[in-house]
Image (cartoon, grey):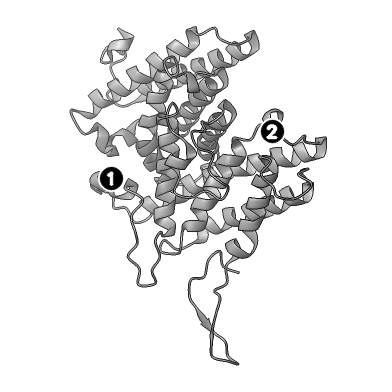
């Protein structure tokens, strides 16, 4: 079955329209709804105990969608991807110790595996969008096209009446994630995502665990990137500015100031830069269009180093957590300096960036 099949088929015997086939509507949506109702105690069933069977069904549904995303055509219906993204973030925000249902050991293990799948789903969406944005790119492509790719939320204008295509849905998911990371203080899932399968919980803010998981999806994308194309460069050009602002705002935004959030953001930037191995992607970022490439690189390095140094000096949490944050900050600072020193035309003294004076 296709994930979605908007075409109406005729019954050969009676010549009447039949309902379109849809893997999402027939299988995935019910599995997601049942899982959320059980996790958050909104089930109408007499027994709200979580069963491994329901979570396993959600895992299978999520697995099928993850495989569908890279293969789908740009103009296919994209609403199921938005529903799935909402489901994924809801699941990542679930905390067993805060839930109304007590998890057995086996159920907790299944939910943990489902949460890992949700992280993978976000990484798959990021990768697919980056690939679609760069597959037809020309060597001298204008940077303004990045804005077109990231504009999101537009209708496809299809004659079949679709309101959202696969490509538009992927753009919206990335835009929502960027909004969550940059507006953690006031953003709710209801305002960030277009659709939710579960009943919206107004004014709900993401837990540190969910925030960390979203950042881990970015690190996962970088770690698994093996392509020779420029998809990772495109992703960095469109996501890195959000991450840099984040690592510099941990100390003023209490929602993202949890030590695990700080470590995860540092790790996400570190993994992305380590995989890229250069700052060449900065030249394709429209937001850095003023001045020379060297000045943009210097400003970027200063921003990262300031944020990493602040995190290194932090002493919040227990000693083990503080050590994790310091290690992540150290890795990031050393990576940035190493990449900068190896860049062609770099002054060995490093004095072209004021931070190193």
Write the residue at 54% across / 19% down: 258
Distance Cα–Cα, label 1 vs label 2: 41 Å
Residue 278 is at least partly visible in this image? no
Of residues 144 and 78, the one nearer the viewer is 78
Identify whether 284 is placed above or below 321: below
Q: What residue is shown with label 1? A: 147
- Badge 1 or badge 2: first in the primary sequence: 2
Q: Is residue 171 left or right of residue 267?
A: left
Q: What residue is shown with label 2? A: 99
**Callout 2: 10 Å neighbours few (<14), some, many (20+)?**
few
Q: Position of residue 299 (x, y in %)?
A: 28, 21
Element carrying mark 1 = helix
**Callout 1: 10 Å neighbours few (<14), some, many (20+)?**
few
Of residues 117 and 235, the one nearer the viewer is 117
Q: Based on the displayed image, in which of its 4 quarters is residue 18 positioned? A: bottom right
- Can you tell which of label 1 and label 2 is closer to the viewer? 2
Identify whether 178 is placed above or below 62: above
Residue placed furthest toward the left: 291
Q: Based on the displayed image, in which of its 4 quarters is residue 356 positioned? A: top left
Q: Position of residue 116 (x, y in %)?
A: 64, 40
Q: Is residue 293 left or right of residue 178?
A: left
Q: Position of residue 21 (x, y in %)?
A: 57, 72
**Count of labels shown?**
2
Of residues 199 and 212, the one nearer the viewer is 199
Identify whether 44 is placed above or below 252: below
Cβ–Cβ under 8 Å for marks 1 and 2: no
Residue 58 is at least partly visible in this image? yes
Q: Position of residue 226 (x, y in %)?
A: 51, 44
Write the residue at 57% across / 21% down: 260
């Amino acid at each position: 079955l296709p994930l979605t099949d908007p075409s109406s088929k005729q019954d050969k015997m009676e010549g009447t329209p039949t309902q379109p086939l849809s893997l999402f509507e027939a299988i995935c949506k019910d599995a997601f709804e049942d899982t959320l109702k059980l996790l958050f105690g909104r089930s109408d069933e007499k027994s709200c105990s979580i069963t491994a069977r329901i979570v396993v069904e959600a895992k299978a549904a999520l697995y099928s969608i993850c495989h569908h995303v890279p293969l789908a055509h740009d103009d296919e219906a994209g609403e199921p991807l938005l529903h799935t993204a909402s489901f994924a973030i809801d699941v990542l925000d679930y905390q067993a110790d805060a839930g109304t249902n007590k998890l057995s050991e086996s159920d907790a293990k299944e939910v943990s595996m489902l949460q890992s799948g949700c992280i993978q789903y976000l990484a798959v969406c990021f990768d697919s969008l980056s690939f679609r944005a760069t597959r037809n790119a020309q060597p001298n492509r204008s940077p303004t096209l990045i804005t077109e790719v990231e504009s999101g939320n537009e209708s496809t204008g299809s004659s079949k009446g679709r309101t959202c295509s696969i490509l538009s849905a992927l753009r919206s998911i990335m835009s929502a994630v960027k909004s969550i990371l940059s507006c953690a203080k006031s953003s709710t899932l209801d305002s960030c995502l277009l659709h939710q399968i579960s009943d919206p919980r107004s004014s709900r803010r993401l837990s540190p665990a969910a925030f960390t998981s979203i950042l881990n999806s970015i690190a996962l994308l970088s770690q698994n990137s093996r392509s020779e194309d420029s998809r990772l460069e495109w992703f960095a050009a469109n996501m890195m500015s959000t991450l840099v602002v984040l690592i510099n705002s941990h100390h003023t935004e209490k929602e993202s100031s949890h030590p695990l959030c700080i470590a995860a953001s540092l790790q996400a930037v570190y993994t992305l830069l380590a995989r890229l191995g250069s700052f060449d992607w900065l030249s394709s970022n429209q937001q850095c269009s003023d001045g020379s490439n060297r000045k943009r690189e210097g400003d970027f390095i200063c921003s990262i180093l300031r944020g990493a140094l602040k995190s290194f000096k932090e002493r919040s949490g227990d000693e083990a957590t503080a050590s994790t944050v310091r290690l992540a900050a150290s890795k990031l600072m050393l990576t940035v300096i190493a990449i900068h020193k190896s860049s062609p035309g770099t002054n060995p003294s490093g004095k072209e960036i004021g931070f190193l004076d």
